[in-house]
Amino acid sequence: MVDEKVITINDRIPKLKEQRKQRANRRLTFFLSFFFFLILLVIYFQSPLSHIKMIEVHGNYYLPAETIVKASKLNSGTSLWKLNQEEVKERIINLDEIEKANLSRKFPNTIEIHVVEYQRVAYMFQEGKYYPILSTGVFLDELPPNEMPVDAPILKDWESGPVAQELAAEITKLSDGLFNRISEIYYTPTETDPLRVIVYMNDGYEVHSTVRNFSERIAPYPSIVKEIDPNKTGIIHMRMTPYFEEFIGEEEEEGEGEW
């Protein structure tokens, strides 16, 4: 019979004591670490370490970051964790150009401002200056002399007011493809149509239409252009039933035939 080694309780006691001691040390280390962590948090929140040191602005394209920061009224004396986010967002949204605003904290002392700007749907040209028009119909101050409008149509022979605002609202409904094909829009009212407009397209065509329901009237433009002989020039009338009026010679003929 093989001899079996018998471990007595006296042999196991030292090992059990050592295990208990290790567990106690681990618990003590955990509690001490947690205690010091709480102390560090208290020091951080009560000291200038938690004050805003840096403000980052994201999402702005037209509006300078400095303007947004100034509107937020955030400064280096503001606690990162005690600021009223809703009040700050409201101040930023009060800027004409800003549609949405959100804040986020970045440890240890940075605030990130995320904004969404309203689209610029057109630029009004007056006395050699360009005035941006937002999708809300708001007219902004003139562009700096070294800045040219390249991202939206130019309105000529217009004045700020309800008619221009109505057109701006219509432009926001256009598809991106059609929006990018418009170069200039002239306001040319007549007795029979006080909202008449002439639109010059980037592909060389001239379109006659009206402000009322402008987006719906001009929507068929791409399909109409595909059917026109590229060697012909003329006017695409898009008020009621669209039709193409070809230029004959150097003068415009007032043909009424449907295209």
Image (spheres, rainbow, N blue to C red):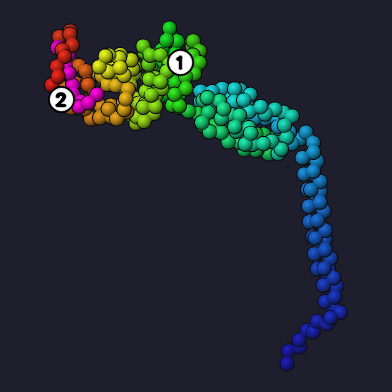
Image x and y of residue 19, in percent: 80, 68
Q: Main secondary structure of the magenta part?
A: loop
Residue found at x 34% / y 31%: 175
Q: Is residue 124 magenta?
A: no
Say which amino acid is labelled 2.
Trp
Which of 189 and 58 lies nearest the eye of the viewer?
Answer: 189
Q: Label 2 crowding class (10 Å Cα cut-off): few <14, some 14-19, many 20+?
A: few
First in residue order: circle 2 vs circle 1: 1
Say which amino acid is labelled 1.
Tyr
Total labels: the figure holds: 2
Q: Is residue 243 magenta?
A: yes
Which of 152 and 18 lies nearest the eye of the viewer?
Answer: 152
State the mark number for residue 179: none
Distance from label 2 to label 1 (Cα)?
Answer: 37 Å
Image x and y of residue 70, in percent: 63, 24
**Location of residue 185 (image quadrant):** top left
**Location of residue 128 (image quadrant):** top left
Does 127 sit left or right of 113 as displayed? left
Which region is colored magenta?
A: 239-248
The residue carrying mark 1 is 131
Residue found at x 18% / y 21%: 244
Residue found at x 77% / y 40%: 45
Instruction: Describe the element under mark 2 as helix, strand or loop.
Output: loop
53 above or below 132?
below
168 above or below 86?
above
Which of 246 and 7 lies nearest the eye of the viewer?
Answer: 246
Residue found at x 82% / y 72%: 16
- Tell me the quadrant of the picture where the N terminus can be found: bottom right
